[in-house]
């Protein structure tokens, strides 16, 4: 046993992958694991050493509650698993550091880019890093023009909200799949949608800012990264062999040098820090291009 146990607070105790992350921490025998979640009955409650109920990230009491927990239990490290918690934490990170608590996240300025897909693609393109062809749209007319400009109907085109978590709001517009085929032969969680249906749905309410992107047909990788203020410490690409609702359930670790170098560039330009997840996919050109960044611990990091 180590001479001194480290008290770590992991938020998102009910998040996908929380159980695997807790198990990995327990195997190190270095940590006393405090698990927190806004819901009172989550898997992490039964696996960690202690459990705390906290407000949701958008609550005015969220940060104050975490500060109170850190003081009460002498928490040395906060490991957040919930994307919506990152910017509130980064905005008051000095208060945690003042009581001796390290929060393993990037700066607020880096997070505001990484968490917004449109800002992310614009920033990386500006910095000379290859990204998929894309258009940012704010109206239904811009949406129609963007889909056509990116090659539809000859090519499949994707769209997703600039700010969203997981696969929420992500759809693939494809001329190859008709609506009857989609209804009868695809699972309800299918991400395919017709151009007509996309227009009808997006016209029915307030139009959100969307990122419209070329479809990348090749293999998809989830890359677990550890960064130290823009310097890459560890980069582990993992081929996503099977996914359910956007979450990897089967994968294979692959030492793909092109992915490693690409992610190293992204980490440097964004000055990312802590545990970072980067999703990339192979384009028609055979180069790997970014899909999105999860600037936190990924749920399936236990596989790495």
Image (cartoon, grey):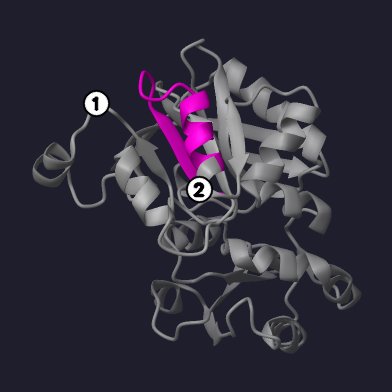
Residue at screen point 54% across, 19% down: 256
From the viewer's perspective, tell me whether residue 277 is left or right of residue 20: right
Magenta-drawn stretch contains 159: yes
From the viewer's perspective, tell me whether residue 72 is left or right of residue 253: right
Name the mark nearer the viewer: 1 or 2: 2
- Provide residue 189's location: percent of width, then percent of height: 26, 51
In terms of image quadrants, where is residue 135?
Answer: top right
Residue lying furthest top in this view?
Answer: 285
- Provide residue 129's location: percent of width, then percent of height: 72, 24
In terms of image quadrants, where is residue 94?
Answer: bottom right
Q: Which residues are magenta?
A: 142-161
Residue lying furthest left in this view?
Answer: 184
Circle 1 is placed at which residue position? 176
- Provide residue 198's location: percent of width, then percent of height: 36, 47
Residue at screen point 77% across, 22% down: 128
- Provide residue 148's location: percent of width, then percent of height: 47, 27
Count of numbered badges drawn on the protein:
2
From the viewer's perspective, tell me whether residue 92 is left or right of residue 214: right
- Does residue 298 appear in this view? yes
Q: Nearer the viewer, residue 125 or 149?
A: 149
Residue lying furthest front in this view?
Answer: 141
Q: Nearer the viewer, residue 152 or 127?
A: 152
Q: Specify few, some or many for label 1: CA neighbours under 10 Å numbering under 14, 14-19, or 20 or more.
A: few
Quarter containing the N terminus: bottom right
Circle 2 is placed at which residue position? 140
């Amino acid at each position: 046993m180590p001479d001194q146990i480290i008290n770590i607070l992991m938020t998102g105790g009910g998040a996908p992958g929380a159980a695997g992350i807790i198990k990995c921490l327990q195997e190190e025998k270095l940590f006393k694991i405090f698990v927190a979640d806004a819901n009172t009955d989550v898997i992490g409650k039964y696996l960690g050493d202690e459990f705390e109920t906290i407000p949701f990230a958008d609550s005015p009491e969220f940060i104050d509650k975490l500060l109170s927990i850190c003081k009460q239990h002498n928490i040395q490290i906060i490991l957040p698993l919930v994307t919506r918690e990152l910017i509130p934490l980064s905005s008051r990170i000095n208060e945690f550091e003042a009581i001796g608590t390290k929060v393993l996240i990037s700066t607020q300025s880096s997070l505001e880019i990484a968490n917004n897909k449109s800002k992310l693609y614009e920033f990386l393109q500006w910095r000379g890093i290859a990204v998929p062809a894309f258009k940012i749209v704010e109206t239904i007319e811009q949406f129609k023009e963007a889909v056509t400009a990116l090659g539809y109907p000859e090519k499949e085109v994707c769209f997703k909200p600039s700010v969203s978590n997981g696969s929420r709001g992500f759809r693939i517009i494809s001329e190859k799949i008709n609506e009857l085929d989609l209804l009868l032969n695809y699972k309800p969680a299918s991400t395919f949608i017709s151009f007509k249906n996309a227009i009808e749905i997006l016209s029915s309410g307030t139009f959100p800012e969307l990122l419209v992107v070329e479809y990348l047909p090749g293999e998809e990788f989830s890359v677990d990264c550890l960064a130290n203020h823009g310097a890459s410490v560890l980069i582990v690409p993992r081929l996503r062999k099977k996914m359910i609702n956007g979450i990897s359930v089967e994968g294979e670790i692959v030492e793909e040098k092109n992915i490693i170098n690409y992610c190293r560039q992204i980490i440097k330009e964004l000055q990312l820090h802590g545990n970072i997840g980067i999703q990339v996919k192979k384009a028609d050109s055979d180069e790997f291009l970014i899909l999105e960044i999860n600037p936190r611990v990924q749920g399936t990091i236990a596989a790495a």
